[in-house]
Image (cartoon, rainbow, N blue to C red):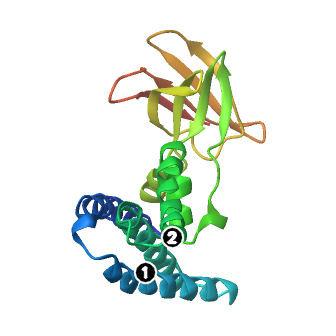
Amino acid sequence: MNTSLFVGTIIFYILSLAGSLLLAIASKKISGKRFYYFAILHIILIIAAVLFTLSNVSGLAKNYLTLAGMCSGVLLSGWAIRNEEIRILVRWYFGLYLLTVLLFLYSPSMLFYGLSGNGGNYQRDKEILVEKNYYLATQSQFVQLNTGSEQYKLIQKLGVFNKTIARDIDLGGKVDSVKVIIFTSDTIVLTGFINGIITRTTGLKPGMNKNTITTQSN
């Protein structure tokens, strides 16, 4: 998934949410009959996206068709739910698109990959235990698309919430394990390994904008 498609997905989804809210506010002043014209266009986009997917056609056409179909569903959801002239089954169908908000709260990257038809390429964040409830996790896939390298963040798990301790940690590649050299409240030094071979030793100052203070490559 390229950067432009990822950014475009974010922008279109946010705009569709904003448009859905505005349509929900104005829905009772708009005839429900007009809604069906836009609903038909939405269905055409969804069918086209499904056909492209089933035919294994690759390229941005499939991605943008899927994105247009999904975002049009989100856009129309506010209008559908609030206007009682629209049939109940249609209102339920479009209401399902609002569930994407829950997925957004759970995992924005997973949502954006799905909206753009790249759900099969999505990879869960890898987590490596560092110390007690501290983990090294792969950073946002959007960050990786921009930097072109594997970036990590150090998080502290607090029940269902995660606290980010440090970001933009570069250990010289996609490491499979780490060794703690120093772990205090103000200094953390980690060594990354790939197949048992040291890739890089990196020192961090938690909470500081410039996290990396020392870097030594093998």
Task: Tell me: 178 left or right of 38.
Answer: right
The Cα atoms of the two marked residues, 2 and 1, are separated by 20 Å
- Which image quarter is the C terminus in? top right
The vertical placement of 187 against 218, above or below, is above
Task: Tell me: 35 left or right of 30.
Answer: right
Q: Nearer the viewer, mark 2 or mark 1?
A: 1
**Residue at image x 55%, y 88%?**
48
Could you tell me residue 70's position as x and y percent?
Answer: 48, 71
Viewer-proximal residue, 139 or 194? 139
Judging by the rendered image, the residue that carries numbered circle 1 is 39
How many numbered discs, if any?
2
Residue 9 quadrant:
bottom left
Q: Indicate the amino acid at tag 1.
A: Ala
Task: Tell me: 11 left or right of 183.
Answer: left
Q: Secondary structure at mark 2?
A: loop
Reading the chain from its start, which is encountered first: label 2 or label 1?
A: 1
Q: Indicate the amino acid at tag 2.
A: Ser
Residue 54 quadrant:
bottom right
User: Does any portion of residue 141 appear in the rendered image?
Assistant: no
Label 2 neighbour load within 10 Å: few <14, some 14-19, many 20+? many
The vertical placement of 65 against 159, above or below, is below
Task: Tell me: 120 left or right of 44.
Answer: right
Residue 142's tag is none
**Residue at image x 56%, y 13%?**
183
**Residue at image x 30%, y 60%?**
24
Residue 116's tag is 2
